[in-house]
Amino acid sequence: MAPEPPPLLTMSGITKSFPGVRALDGVDLEVQAGEVHCLLGQNGAGKSTLIKVLAGAHQPDDGSITWQGAPVQLSSPITAMRLGIATIYQELDLVEGLSVAENVFLGHEPTTAGFVVRTREARTAAAALLRRLGHPEIDPAREVGDLSAAHQQIVSMARALSHDVRLIVMDEPSAALDPDEVDNLFRIVEGLTSDGVAVVYISHRLEEIRRIGDRVTVLKDGRAVAVGLPASSTPTRDIVAMMTGRDVEYVFPPRPAPGAPRATTQPVLTVEGLHRRGEFEPVDLELRPGEIVGLAGLVGSGRSEILETIYGARRPTAGRVQVAGTPLRPGSVRAAVAAGIGLAPEERKAQALLLTESVTRNVSLSALSRFARGGWLDRGAERTAARRATRELSLRPDNPDAAVRTLSGGNQQKAVLARWLLRGCRVLLLDEPTRGVDVGARAELYAVIRRLADEGLAVLLVSSEVPEVLGLADRVLVLREGRVVHQADAQELDEHRVLDLVMEGSPTS
């Protein structure tokens, strides 16, 4: 019998330290050609550092790397790419002002002897790569900034394939995709692996690991606590316990006991006949202090549009929104915020946070007038108030001067919530509150949201993850194609029933 070929990639004893922190502490990783190897771990576990070592962006302090059986030193991203290692980061590094073809061949453009780019050849080659990825509809001549997030990701994959890649690292590739786009992503991954390309797949969504993964390596606190586990047969409970150091499933805090009195029986938010042509049909709902109401439905069902219309970011075609019985001016964010409505949007980095500013400034942003003293900003009072709000939510690190971009996804979300706590909002609109947040941090956010509701805040929640809606909400409205097709207490529903309704449900009478 012929000897087994060596692993495509072996990383042994990889160590990397930064000032004050040991990011990697003797990590091992082994990847076979044609497999999907899933890399799991909470934020801060060392995943990002490990893939930057693999990409040649960081140099390890110790350890060895073997590629196709031979020792290598990945001294730069160019070195890694020449070997056939490509990395697609969660924050795509495309140049928006350039065309699709220019992005695909950026840095190795086909040129004439006079160094003139052969544009037609580049577009033809880019089109061939896009066809291989199942997306012939993407125009190589189109400016990449005009594409959807899903199509931009396809362009990043085409760029990787333009280098005759043997291994692709995908960092949270499904974070901004709807279910159909995720299915297409998985078809692409399966096509790549059938051609012998290996994929290192990083995701917080454990259900994806079951669908796409062959083996799993788990990192915790810079160490590999499990290497090469079978993805399909390792129990979720075991994976999460390894990631967090404790036994966690979908850890939802207990709801109030049935029949427990609310702070008041009067609704704080009333939505009557709210309608926006082409996005959602008339919606009626009431939300009481201390209550969490969930909106369940597929991407495009109108969930986010309803939240943004209540918040005033979109002007309704008809209907009205009232807070404590007082109607709001349609299409006015200022009026909604003044009445006590806060929004934590789906894309917190792009829509809610000033990434280069401090935690203090991000938290105080909606309440700056409170700290004005004779035309000057009382920075001491601002900092004290912001720190009080972040400590109430256990935001880490406890450093109000840290740039918010340095925080993990879960702590960035806490900064957004702290902003509305400081503002004193009465109604909190949450759109995908745990997107890009690891398992352990999710449990913390769930506890925070439930505690805020128990203290009297009214919460309207949107999530693509049905278990999250059912686990957090007291009541659920199910949406399909812009229409409410069912309303019920969350405990009367299960995941299969909700999925049946969003796929084939008929409107309630």
Image (tube, rainbow, N blue to C red):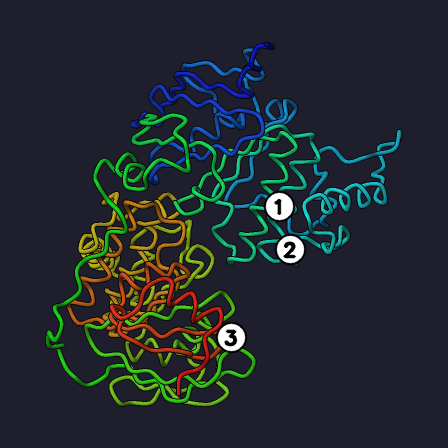
Question: Relative to residue 395, is residue 141 drawn left or right?
Answer: right
Q: Earlier along the polypeptide chain: callout 2 or callout 3? A: 2
The residue lying toward the viewer, choosing from 231 and 408, is 231
Q: Are marks 2 and 1 in contact (CB under 8 Å)?
A: yes
Q: In the rendered image, which quarter is residue 370 located in?
A: bottom left
Q: Nearer the viewer, mark 1 or mark 3?
A: 3
What residue sits right under mark 1 in the picture? 94
> Mark 2 and mark 3: span between their CA atoms?
28 Å
Query: Helix, strand, or loop for circle 3?
Result: loop
Please tell me how crowded label 3 is: few (under 14), some (14-19), or many (20+) other residues with Cα within 10 Å.
some
Amino acid identity at mark 1 = Leu
The answer to whether residue 178 shows anywhere in this view is yes
What residue sits right under mark 2 in the picture? 145
Residue at image coords 83%, 44%: 119
Question: Is 142 situated above or below 375?
Answer: above
Amino acid identity at mark 2 = Gly
The residue lying toward the viewer, choosing from 201 and 433, is 201
Residue at image coords 10%, 77%: 261
Residue at image coords 23%, 45%: 398
Q: In the rendered image, which quarter is residue 16 located in?
A: top left
Amino acid identity at mark 3 = Glu
> Mark 1 and mark 3: span between their CA atoms?
32 Å
